[in-house]
Image (cartoon, grey):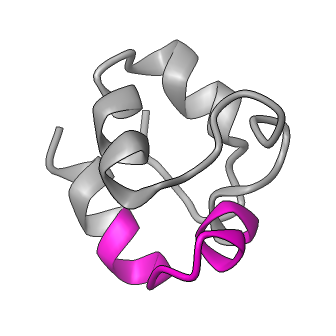
Amino acid sequence: MEIEVSDKIDDVIRANPEALRVFSDFGIDTCCGAQRSLREGAEDASVDAEELMTALRSL
């Protein structure tokens, strides 16, 4: 799965469970916020979306 910033957090986790660690490292809500896009999750956690994407794509 190629990951895009518009993908939902939950979809990324389903495709690659190791993504949970990345989300945890970045402080991104994977429970109540899992239906948000990666961009929205990054904004809510005040992290750079590109840094998050780089970390996720490295899995």
- Quadrant including the C terminus: top left
Residue occupying the point 38% across, 59% down:
26
Q: Residue at x 47, y 55 (%)?
A: 27
Q: Is 18 on the left-hand or right-hand side of 8?
A: left
Q: Out of 41 and 11, give the one closest to the viewer.
A: 41
Q: Nearer the viewer, residue 46 or 3?
A: 46
Task: Find residue 39 and report its image quarter.
Answer: bottom right
Magenta-drawn segment: 40-52
Is residue 9 found left or right of 23 in the rendered image?
A: right
Q: Indicate yes or no whether the magenta region holds residue 51.
A: yes
- Where does the image place residue 48, in percent across and percent down from the top left? 44, 85
Q: Is residue 24 above or below residue 21?
A: below
Judge whether residue 48 is colored magenta.
yes
Instruction: Give the number of marks.
Output: 0
- Counting from the top left corner in percent of width and height, residue 35 is at 84, 38
Q: Measuring 37% from the left and 65% from the top, which residue is drawn there?
A: 53
Q: Pick out the residue farthest to the left.
A: 58
Against 6, residue 48 (above or below) is: below
Relative horizontal placement of residue 4, taking residue 17 as reference (left or right): right
Quarter in which the N terminus is drawn = top left
Residue 50 x, y percent position in the rendering: 39, 81
Name the chief secondary structure element in magenta. Answer: helix
**Which of 4 and 44 lies nearest the eye of the viewer?**
44
Q: Nearer the viewer, residue 5 or 35?
A: 35
- Residue at image x 23%, y 58%? 55
25 over 20 or under it: above or below: below
